[in-house]
Amino acid sequence: MSNQDWIKPYKLVEYHAEALFTHDHNLRLRTINEPWPGAADAPRFFLGRSIEGTTLSRFRYDVQEKLVRQLEGLCADEPIVTDFQTKPKHFEAYMNLLQGKRFTMGPCYLVPREAASTMKVVNVNRENMKELLGGNFEWMTSEIDYAQPCVALIRENQAVSICRSVRITSMAHEAGLETLEEFRGIGYAASVVAGWAMEVRKVGGLPLYSTSWDNLASQSVARKSALSFYGVNFTVY
């Protein structure tokens, strides 16, 4: 991370968790923090492992307190994370104790302040959405007022790569990235991520980018954009 942008990895993990999920007054997870109406249930367990060795654990409101204490003890025993492909040390225990049906895991990044778009991008809003999103991204029009900032790279008057805020708090925004298949691998996604991050900073937020451990295309965008890796998330449903 740049000196300009130095924030402890643990704090970024915390901002990430708060952006992903709604919490009650006991910091128990309630729902997925989607900015548009309607919300799915949060996972039963969230574990954030930072590159400095600290961990952050959050539990859904219906996980019993005795089990929470047991899981917290395991979380405190997690080693420093260096490779986002590595499952948590106590992966099997987490799955068994929570009777987990599935899990998610992936690297988490901060888009650095010096990230700059190498191509022209435009902000998409209610005024220009029909012109730019018609066709391939028509489904986004119903969410346009909620998922802001929304930045697109345009080819032949149509959006071909879009980055927008899909989880939002007063401290941080999480990126949602969509690029048409035929326009992948040529730098478009990196440009819209950088353009989106600049807009997020203008409204006082930190631009965060996370993906799945098996999403190679998204990881490639992170590498090309020189994003700052700060940790790995892990959830159990």
Image (spheres, helix red, strand yellow):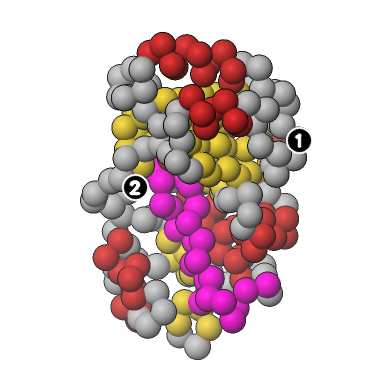
Q: How many marks?
A: 2
Q: Is residue 65 magenta?
A: no
Q: Main secondary structure of the magenta part?
A: strand
Q: Which callout, 2 or 1, points at the residue further toward the start of the chain?
A: 2
Query: Looking at the rendered structure, which numbered label has been put on residue 34?
Result: 2
In which image quadrant can residue 144 be found? Answer: bottom left
Please give the name of the residue rendered at 59% of the width and 20% of the height, measured from the top-left corner: 75
Looking at the image, the residue that sits furthest to the right is 82
In which image quadrant can residue 29 be found? Answer: top left
Residue 58 in the image, given as x and y percentages of width and height: 45, 25
Residue 50 in the image, given as x and y percentages of width and height: 65, 30
Please give the name of the residue rendered at 36% of the width and 56% of the height, measured from the top-left corner: 147
> Of residues 165 and 92, which is closer to you in this image?
92
Label 2 to label 1: alpha-carbon separation = 29 Å
Query: Looking at the rendered structure, which numbered label has been put on residue 82?
Result: 1
- SS state under label 1: loop
Whether residue 186 is visible here, answered yes or no, is: yes
